[in-house]
Image: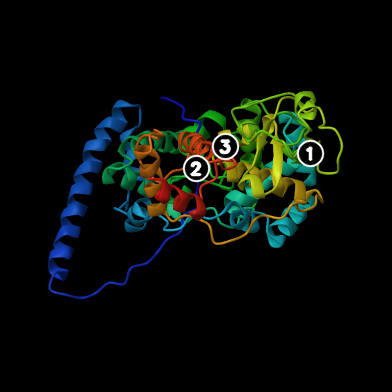
Amino acid sequence: MNKSVKLLASCLILFSTPLVADDNDNNNQQISVQKENAFKQWVSNFKKDAVSNGITTTTFDTAFENVQLNSRVIKADNKQAEFSREIWDYLDTATSPKRIANGKENLSDYLNLLREIQFKYQVDAEVILAIWGLESSYGKRMGDINIIEALATLAFDGRREKFGKQQLLEALSIIQRGDITPDKMMGSWAGAMGHTQFIPTSYQAYAQDFTGDGKRNVWDPLDPSDALASTANYLAEFGWTNNQPWGIEVNLPENFNYRNADLEVKATPARWSELGLKTITGGKIPNYGEGSVFLPAGAKGPAFIVFNNFFVIKRYNNANSYAMAVGHLSDRILGGKPFHIEWPRGPGALKFNEKVELQNLLNQLGYDVGEADGIIGPNSIAAIRKFQISVGLIPDGMSNKDLLLKMRTSN
């Protein structure tokens, strides 16, 4: 089977909607019954696919015993957070004093294990710890939804049918191999499992039996060895450079060309030094290989040069904010300091519908971003920069309320 290497973010803001009794209650109940019946039929049909892919009927029947359509999964999958968090709000949580303190405590408690893992996989122990801390609060929040039920619901409900089926087949293979029993295969609504939240395809490709007991047990609440080793193996497979940082905070020269603040633009430390960049203390940029200038809050916030390991972390979770959180948390666990430059805190974050509006305006102004989906990715950032240049703004690619207002008046 195709081994996906992408992990889904396991955090989602959930909102509850009060139920109001009215004349439609019976109809709603009938629809629910119909959907449950349709789900049972889907399970019956999927069983044929599973068996044709090598899953035994015994494994399938055991795994699907008492499995139902899960309303929590449907609601979580369909919810769209109204507000997007600013990078500083995300980092405030990701690198909170409590998470840092817990990281230091776990570093002490598992020092020998982490040293063994670092020696074998050549991945820095504090980074493994940081991922563990972000994914499950060091094993305290690994998820409480049955993975077979979650993935079957996703596969049936339609929007994630292909993903759900692929992950479900792999989850059944994991059970059939004997790594875990169905009742203990718990995780998030999106199918992420264990201490460091692997989805089944990533588990199959990268999970490790570090304890040597014949099982790749990333769920064991008392022993995170296999999970931490699996995470190290994942990072190592994607090119981790041991004993090198994810990035460093830097000072930009006054004449800095903000078109160079792009993760696609890479240069050697010597070249960045020639262009006037210095460390935050005024020194030369250390030679950690090629790096990119990263401005997570635009021209008004702190500036960084990020190196190879930043991009390796993004193979675990493709969000820039996640990669930065892992890197900064790992630094803080080892006693590192907060960033020197303050974040430009303010009420500038765009709502989801405002991001869609911004993208539509960019398209109308001739800056093609494709479908307006509310996701400010590389295409949108590139288009924003072109617009900023056209109106004499610093081309830092940042989307905020000031930019949206400027675009409204330019349309």
Question: Which residue is identified by label 1?
Answer: 115
Looking at the image, do the residues carrying marks 1 and 2 touch, with CB atoms under 8 Å apart? no
Give the amino acid at mark 2. Answer: Ile
Residue 46 locus on image (x, y percent): 26, 36
Label 2: state its secondary structure. Answer: loop
Q: Which mark is residue 180?
A: 2
Q: Position of residue 178 (x, y in %)?
A: 49, 37
Identify the disc placed on residue 150. Answer: none
Residue type at mark 3 is Tyr
Spatial distance from mark 2 to mark 3, Cα to Cα? Answer: 23 Å
Residue shown at 57% from the left, 43% from the top: 393
Seen at 47% across and 50% down, the residue is: 406
- Against 406, is 241 above or below? above
- For the N terminus, the image quarter is top left
Q: Residue 217 is drawn in which quadrant?
A: top right
Q: Are marks 2 and 3 in contact (CB under 8 Å)?
A: no
Picture layout, residue 150 above or below residue 348: above
Sequence order check: which comes first, mark 1 or mark 3?
A: 1
In the figure, is residue 78 to the left or right of 185?
Answer: left
Helix, strand or loop at label 1? It is helix
Q: Distance between the residues labelled 1 and 3?
A: 21 Å
Mark 3 residue element: helix
Instruction: Please report whichever mark, 1 or 2, sits nearer to the chain's N-terminal start.
Output: 1
Q: Relative to the observer, which residue lies in front, 263 or 52?
A: 263
Q: Name the residue under label 3.
A: 316
Answer whether residue 212 is visible to the viewer in this image.
no
Of discs 2 and 3, which sits in the foreground?
3
The amino acid sitting under disc 1 is Arg
Q: How crowded is the residue under tag 3: few (<14 C-alpha within 10 Å), some, or many (20+)?
A: many
74 displayed left or right of 13:
left
